[in-house]
Image (cartoon, grey):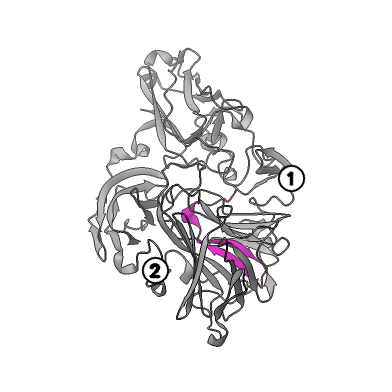
Amino acid sequence: MSESVQNAVGRRAFVVGGAVAAGGAVLAGPLARTASAAAFGWSDDGSQYVVDTGANLVVRISKTTGDLTSLVYRGTEYQGYGGMNSHVESGLGTSTVTIAQSGSTVLVSVGHGTLRHYYAVRSGENNVYLWTYKADASVSATRYIVRVRPGLFLNDEPDSYTYAPTTIEASDVFRKSDGQTRSKHYARLRVADYDHVGWSTGTVGLYLVRSNHEKASGGPFYRSLLRHQSADGGGLYEILYYGENQTEDQRFGLQGPYVLAFTDGGAPSSALYPAALTTPWADGLGISGYVPAGGRGRVAGVGITGRNTAFTYTVSLANAAAQYWGQARASDGFFSVPGMLPGTYTLTVHKGELAVYSTSVTVTAGGTTTLNTLAIPSSNDPGNASAIWRIGDWDGTPRGFKNAELMTYAHPSDVRAASWTGNVVVGGGTETSSFPCYLWKDVNSGIVVHFRLTAAQAAAAHTLRIGVTTAYANGRPQITVNDTWTSAVPSPPAQPSTRSLTVGSYRGNNHTFTYSVPASAWLTDTGAYNTLRISVASGSGTTSFLSAGTSIDAIDLLA
């Protein structure tokens, strides 16, 4: 957590992921204290269903649209801004809405065409459990947004634009007077990095705890908007499928539960987090597509060999119906991924975010599929190849390159960004930190890398590799060596078609470009520097930071 964020927490601040506001506050969730059962229940006021948790939360849901129209916690209304409610996508419109109570649970069911959405409230809990079932593409249901009244929480972080009056891109990226940029897209985090997103005043916390994303798309490294705040109000998001930077088709079925949680200022109970939450109380509620714990299975791996222990390894499992992931243990590569729907999956081992191994695995209901030690072949990791020089690490990310960390929460034009131009000299130890993480045709195409070769090295042909993590507008690298030899323009690999580099994401499809450089291209003077010019080729894109571009993973010249 940055110093500025630490200073904000404990006043009126936001909390994302595992960060906790100061104050030692009481947690909310399945472990919360139970209030008087007599206060728990629901009523019908004519236009809305009113559900009282019997604790400190009263929820109202429209009988016409299924919108969440009111969230009153400890007597304060938190829901809504600009005349808008909290709902699926931008609101479903006229829907069939019903309510039923089963013991200590009240369930509100919303039907709109083939889509079903559910709100569950439990006696004594200051939580609302939500599920969304999307059967097909007939309804554009891609998110749930919790709209929060303005002025209740402070947020001047990357995903806020309260103090950023100047629009610099589309209608969703803004610049403050001090030159810093703000956008709801600038969440900093991958899906695997957070459990919840929200705000805290120190005495009241409002959070959205994400689901396990088994029906979402993009895997553990996907980045998307999580939250926004402006002078008009704030929003918390559960993204079910978002049309930006997608590398997979959308999945259909039941997504959830994700949990709207109020607390006394602290983080939500960890019992609500996707890795821990169980909902046996929902098994008999009739939720469409619901699969109880007994209908799910687990995959466990004894270990993974062939790892570079300087990197984190993640195991993902995916098919057309579902996706899951888990982190491999640093000591031996052991992993366990529970709660999976039955089926056959592609299991992929990622070094950082780079796929280095894959196999097929079948999951059965109620069973554990145990895998023997997985062995990553040395040739599967490009970092194992012998290189004359290398810039960056082969880990599927631009980590370590100039401006790489900043670009997950700022626009490339941000005042905090170091110059995107400037050439690089191999051998001084700053090759990676001085090479820009992104290249654009209209900004810094033509960056030059200077390097020396020995006589033996200069007498031979060599392969040069450039790894990329994504591209915008078909941007791809073309190289020129010593201004005498130029490569062909490579074909563009499949990449997301939407904005990426300017909205906080380098995540696309990792791809390695290879160039066979003949011996005749090298300088024979061993004291002279060879030059490698890297340009961005593409006829697409517009100008500046929206011209064709690409994100760099690693560059090396093989021995």
Q: Residues within 10 Å of mark 1 (few under 14, many from 20)?
A: some
Question: Looking at the picture, how far across and down is residue 43, in whole percent?
Answer: 58, 77
Residue type at tag 2: Gly
Do the numbered discs 1 and 2 sit on residues whose CB atoms are within 8 Å?
no
Q: Is residue 262 magenta?
A: no
Q: Residues within 10 Å of mark 2 (few under 14, many from 20)?
A: few
The residue wearing badge 2 is 286
Taking 475 as reference, is 501 above or below it? below
Q: Which residue occupies the foreground of this view, 203 or 279?
A: 279
Residue 358: quarter of image? top left
Question: Looking at the picture, how far across and down is residue 140, in whole percent?
Answer: 50, 48
Residue 509: quarter of image? top left
The residue wearing badge 1 is 176
Label 1 vs 2, first from the N-terminus: 1
Question: Looking at the picture, how far across and down is residue 520, in whole percent?
Answer: 39, 12
State how far apart marks 1 and 2 are (Cα).
49 Å
Furthest-right residue in view? 177
Relative side of 110 to 422, left or right: left
Residue at the spot x=72%, y=52% of the render? 162
Q: Which residue occupies the foreground of this view, 399 or 268?
A: 268
Camera-side mark, 1 or 2:
2
Q: Is residue 189 magenta?
A: yes
Residue at the spot x=52%, y=30% of the render? 473
Residue numbers of the magenta segment: 186-211
In this orientation, does residue 402 appear? yes
Q: Which residue occupies the foreground of this view, 252 or 534?
A: 252
Taking 452 as reference, is 29 above or below it? below
Which quadrant does the C terminus fall into?
top left
